[in-house]
Every structure is written in C-alpha cells, then in structure tokens.
Amino acid sequence: MLKVKNLSLRFGGLTAVSDVSFCVEEGETFAVIGPNGAGKTSLFNAISGVYRPTAGEVLIAGSKSRLPFTMSTVLTVFVSALLTGCAAVLILNLTALWDAVIINKFIYDAAFDWVDCFWGSVAYFSAQNTSFMALPFLSGSIVGGLAALKIFSSTRVGPEVCCSFGLTRTFQNVRLFKDLSALDNVLIGLQNGRGLNFFSSLFHLPSLRKQEAANYKKALELLALVGLGLDAERLATQLPYGSQRKLEIARALACNPKVLLLDEPAAGMNTTEKLALVAIIKRIGALVTVILIEHDMQVVMGIANRILVLDYGSQIALGTPAEICVNQAVINAYLGTSSEVASV
Amino acid sequence: MKGSIFSTIFLSVLFSRAKASPLAVLLIISLLPLLFELIFPGHGICERLRPILIFAILGLGLNIVTGNCGLLNLGVAGFMAIGAYTFGILTVPIFPFQINAWLGLLASLIAGAAAGFVLGLPTLRLRGDYLAVVTLGFGEIIQDVIRNLDTITKGSQGLNPLPALSILGVELNNSHPSLSYFSLLIIIFIIVLLLRNLNKSPVGRAWSAVRDDELAAGNMGVPVMRTKLYAFTSGAALSSLAGALWASALGSTGEPGNFDFQLSVTALCIVIVGGLGNLAGVLLGAAVIVGFNSVFLVELSQFLNSAGLSGTQNVLATPANWKFLVLGLVLILMMRLAPRGLIPALKGSSSK
C-alpha cells in the first residue's frame, strides 16, 4: 500500500532522513520508532507532502503522489498564454482603441451598437502593423505560459495531493482548527470527497443540503468511533488534551484514507487513556493501513505488525516486534538493556 | 409613505421572531433612522447616515477576505474604485454605453470579481505581511491607473453625472432619501443572508480551516488555493458593489484620489473594531467608526462653526479634522481592551 524507496530529506547541511526504504502492506499496522531527533516526524513530513524529498520516492497505492501532466494541463497552459498575450496587446493599445472605436463612433442619443463595436475593434487591429503587435503578444504569452507552468509545478505535489491519493495524518503537536467545533473539524475531512462548489454553498442548494445531512451523520459516527460522541458541539480548544488527540484521529479518518499516519498519538496520555487509544487504533487498523510513530514500547509492541527503527536519520532495523526486541543495534541505540533501565 | 411604515413594522416583526441575535437587533436599530425621517422629514437624517451603509457593505466584503479567511488585504479601496468606475463608464452620458443602472451594478460586481481573481491568483502562496504589502501596492496602482487613463476615466475630474438606481421611475438618491436608505438596507439584508449561508457551508468551513492552520487544512484535503481564490473573488465583488452604490447615490465617481489607502485603513478598522469574522460585528463597526467620523464629527464641526465657537481657520479646533486621530486612538484602545472586537466572532458549530 505504501512504498518508500531510498527516501532522503536534507535541509541544507542537515540530513534529517537518509536513504530509508520500506514497504507497508495493506491492512498492516506499521510502527516507526527511534530516539528523539532520529528523523521520524521528518519522514512523515516527507511522505505526506509537507516537504519535498531531496531524493527517493514515495508510492501510495502504487502511484507517485503527484498530479499527472495531462492534456488538460497543456490546454490550461496554452489558454493562459493566449489570454495573457491578448491582454498585453489590448493594454498597450487601450487608449487608441478606445478613441477609435468608442469616442469617434459615438452618436449622441443613439443606442450603442455592440456588434459594430466588435467589428470596429477587429478593423483597428487588422490595420495595425503585425510586427508591432507581435512583440507584446509574444512576451505576454511567454509570461502567461510560464506563470501557468509555475503554478502547476508548485501545486503538483503537496499535502492536498497526498490526501487525494489516500494518505492523511495526525500531527505531533496537535493542529486542530481552533475556531471550529469538534464536529466541524471532522466535517472538514468529510466534505472534500466532492469538490467545493461556491454557488451551491452560496444559495444552500438542495444537493448541498442532502450532502451536508449525510456528512453530519457520518461525522457523528466517526466521533463515536473515537469515543467523543458527547463532545460534538464543543469547541476544539475546549476539549482536554487526550480528547484533542482523538479528535485529530477522527478528522484524519473522515478523509477516507487508505493510509493513515499517526504521529505520536499517545503522547501526554495516562495509562487508561493509552489503553483506550490502543483499542481505537486496533479498530481503525481493521479498516485502513496504519503507520504510527510512538515512544511507548508497550503500545508499539501491542499493536504493531512490523517495526522500523531509525537513528540519526538512517534505518537500523526493520522487522517484527520479536525480531526488534533482540536486535543488538536497536538495543544499543534506543531500547537499552533491562539492566540499564533498572539502574536509572 | 404608508407602504414604508407598513413594511418597516413587518420587517421588525420578522426579525423579532428570529432568534434575538446581535444581527437581528442591529438590523432593527437600522430601521430607526427611517422612522425618524418619515416622522420628521427634512433633517436629512437618511442622507447623512448613508455612508454608514455603504461602508457596511465594504466592510462585509473585507470581512470575507480578512475575517473569515485570514488574508490581510490592505487594498480594498482599489476594488471600490474599480466598482465605481465600471459603473461610471457604463452609465455616464458622455460614453455611448449608457446601460441601465441596475445592470451597471451587476457589471461592477462582475468586474470586481474578475479583479479579485486576477489579484488573487499570483498572491495565493504569500503569507501574512507579504500579502499585505502586495495588496497595498495593488490599491495604489489602481488609483494611479485610473487617474492616468484619462481618455477613459476623465482622470481627476471623475465621471459625472451618473444615473441613480430607480425602481418604477422613483429615483433612489437624495431626491428620495428614505427610499434610498431603505433600498440600501434591503441590499445589506440580502448580502448578510447570503454570507450567513456561506459561513454555514463547506466553503465557510474551509475558509476557517485555512485561516486557522493552512498546512493541516491541506493535509485534510481542503483545496487551499481554490478556497483563497473564492475568498478574494467574493470579497472583491462586494467591495466593488459598495463602490458602484456609492457612485450611483452620489451621482459621480468623484476623483480617483478619494479611493486611497486611508479608505482601505478605514475599512480595516471597521472590521477589526467590530469583530473579525463576525457579520454583526462588521455592521456595528461600520456604525461606530463611520458614524463617529463622517457623521458625528462633521455635525459637531458644523454646530461649533454656526455657534461661533470655532472657525475653519483653526484646524485643531475643527472636530472634522480629528478623523484619523480618532481612528488611531480607537485602534490602540481596541487592541488593548477588546482585541477580538466589540462583538467577537461567535465560535460554534456551523451546522446548526
């Protein structure tokens, strides 16, 4: 379901992630562990489109998470180049055209003839020297075409694109939408299955009302799934910290992902909350592929099918929990032996 | 006249049956000058309060961009100018178009939306301060472009005389002040209804999400670029509508220098003082700021002048000149005492 090949992420001289490769099968629960600063969140950022990887690639459900360069893209670039070129010519000739077509043809008290105006402009432009118009048209269209290409290339990859390919995530420091209620936070995830339509929102068209009613029910179900059924109308910031983390999970699930990245979901929770969280993740794990970063080894060992261990940006081990527990490199870097732990 | 009294009472009943939200209260209060004018005509109350209504529409437009979507726009005056001049060019008798005034309003809406789209497209990736600077530049550019294209816009003279909007032959300008005031109220009412629709819809939620946390919004599938474009376009369209209504009521576009940065700052103050993102707040902000500056201070100056207590030679003693002193003081006080505005945005479930 998720394939990461030779992924590297460098910030100038600092290498956050170095040559990491792994594969996550569908339905698996995969864990990423390692000491602080090992590059786990950077790995998630690179996978979820927040940063562009310096090297390597990420395949979500078999396809690269970037918008393809289709015929409609070519058409859009071509049309914007054409429009910008025409606009450039028009702007340069604006006052002269106005004089020729509007002022000089103005007969007081007669109705304005739009068709005549159109043919007048055509006549004006055909009377112009072609080479005179060529330069502004060319430069305008080059600017327009390049701008369209630039917009395309910068929107080609990114968090939204990853979401459209079926990958969402939660964040290490909770990033909920503060001014919205818990229900609204989840609705944000649900509403993006179909594109945002301005006019149906403006007039509350019946199609929108039906969609909203369906989303409302689904959002309540998702909140119940994570145990927040009674807190639907509360403001996101008014929820206790543990509930906020659960709300983030519900919001991410609302996007109907194939792969769900959980970044330290149990951070700051007490034992009871962690047990509830483990139950939630097990329930989710039956529906989607889950990849999680966690420091609490009991949580990890309880739910992970396989574990990846990172240290200083590179992977030092990959295997089942049983294999990881006895891997010497992992013990040295992260887990520690039981005697080390006892002496603390 | 009986018709207007009846409709006033009808609307008041309508609002009182709705929940007693600040919005309903404000809209009822705004009917009071109308009653005053009907009972004591000739004092020009409705005429003098008209700037409040125009600025309310301008503030509602800016509120979409800055309040709802969190994009700081310092060039609202540019959009207002585009609206005023589009209306002017298409309706003034010296040019052959001379279309119906209502169609002129529609055209200015479309022109404003187009301008908002064109400004929004390249600036979508800019954050915070950078966006503010670009919009500030845009406002200045529009002012100069209008002044320099004088074959089309008649430069510093402005375009006049412009026709007033008329319903069934009744002109909606100073010749019928109460009807003009009432029609502006109706327009504001319709705009507020549509904006409330938007706020409780996926688009409104997307705007809040992009304002709160753009990155998280992107990761949850919100189309950030499209959301910002919607905000820019609709905000610009509303601001242009305000400009066109202003030009129509005045009968002239006035000179391009009127649509300057100070106008943008006034609009921004309205939104901030009233409450970012809150419709009732914007209306209250317009009433407070414009009411104080353009109505109260001017009246005070005239009163002092006629009472012989000060002359126009004494700049400091003429309250009308205190406009920007007051604006600055109000902003400082608001930031200190009530940073979320007079009516902070009601946060809560949008699906109610």
Image: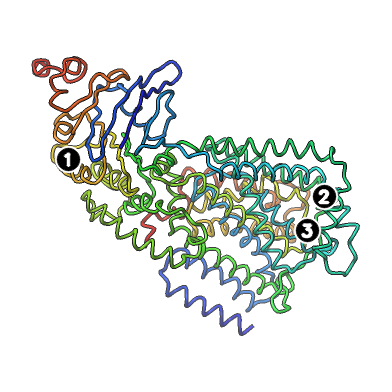
The answer as to whether the residues below labels 3 and 1 share one chain is no
The residue identified by callout 2 is B155
Residue A220 against residue B98 in the figure, above or below: above
Q: Position of residue B86 (x, y in %)?
A: 73, 57
Q: CA distance from mark 1 to mark 2?
A: 71 Å
Chain of the residue on which disc 3 is drawn: B
The answer as to whether the residues below labels 1 and 2 share one chain is no
Residue B98 against residue A8 in the figure, above or below: below
Residue at image location 30% in from the left, 57% down from the top: A218
Q: Position of residue B332 (x, y in %)?
A: 53, 43
- Residue type at mark 2 is Gly
Residue A149 occupies which quadrant of the picture? top right
The residue identified by callout 1 is A278
Q: CA distance from mark 3 to mark 1?
A: 67 Å
Residue at image location 49% in from the left, 62% down from the top: A200
- Residue type at mark 3 is Ile
What kind of element bears circle 1? helix
